[in-house]
Image (cartoon, rainbow, N blue to C red):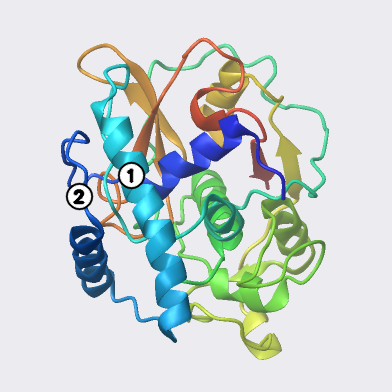
Amino acid sequence: MAFTLEWKFRISIFIVVSGAGESKDASTTLDEASMAMKHELWMAKCARIYVDNAENQWRFKIFKENVEFIEKFNTEANHTYKLGLNEFSNLTDEEFAMFHTGYNPTSSFKNSSFQYENLTDVPPSIDWRNEGAVTPVKFQGVCGSCWAFTAVAAVEGITQIKTGSLISLSEQQLVDCSKNGVNQGCKAGNVLDAFNYIQTNGITSETSYQYIGKNATCDIEKTKNIAACIAGYESVPSDSEEALQKTVFDATVLCFGENEDGINYWLVKNSWGANWGEGGYMRLRKDVGFPEGLRGIAMYASYPVV
């Protein structure tokens, strides 16, 4: 997978951004011993155990590079936020992109009609959590199933909006059973291929098919108790935050609003647990002056339809 410097920077931000992390003055150069101690403390806090010394040395090298990136970033004056350590701080950019963002450059992106194209009655803010359309923040663990969590969150939201019933749906069903396209369980996957699976097979509830965070054989009996269906999915026009906002208003579980200081932002739910960011959410500033939006949020958006 080839990464441009711009993409590498974006992924690095997502590896280390955290509301609970601690930052230090970057002018203080940490020697190898203190860095090793920092790594040991991080391992204990995040319950990381490596299989052998070779893996420990490799992960320590990655951890050290990420810490140095954090220190440098936090001393620069042109940023509106700080970075800190979290449970992903021993991953490379490529590993994080594959296992925790659903990014896959080989995936097809469907070009279709955009049903919200002529929508004009868009409110200044909306928070779908307050409307009962968002399930509590979940945790994908070490399984690279972000694609499944993303698809499920979108289907949970649109199902509640259309039916009034909020049901926590099964990511594990997608991990085990959605083998179409590039989907490979905990190894890799794509949201659009997950939508295709749900359109064909439906999806059961999390209660019926519980998440275990690892690959398993598809349990056909569990999948028979269908809790939600979709008619398909559509793509939001690329590089348009205006189009994305129209979609958010009607069809997804992203939230948007305005801070007290007047800055518009997107509030995005993640699958990395409630200890990450703001109780499991992160803010991305809107209307930043480039078409793809901050961190590329408007580049490849899609949504299910029922």
**Residue underneath mark 2:** 20
* Residue 2 % position (x, y): 71, 44
Three-letter amino acid code at the position of disc 1: Glu
Question: Between disc 1 and disc 2, whose residue precedes?
Answer: 2
**For the residue labelled by badge 1, is the local secondary structure a helix, a strand or a loop?**
helix
* Residue 102 % position (x, y): 61, 53
* Residue 37 % position (x, y): 19, 66
User: Residue sitting at 43 percent across and 67 percent down?
Assistant: 59
Between residue 18 and residue 214, name the one nearer to us.
18
Relative side of 236 to 251, left or right: right
Measured in 3D between alpha carbons, the distance from the residue under mark 1 to the one under mark 2, in whole angstroms, is 18 Å
Three-letter amino acid code at the position of disc 2: Ala
Residue 215 in sight here: yes
Q: Is residue 197 above or below residue 109?
A: below
**Residue underneath mark 1:** 68
User: Residue sitting at 79 percent across and 64 percent down?
Assistant: 200
Instruction: Give the quarter of the image for residue 127.
Output: top left
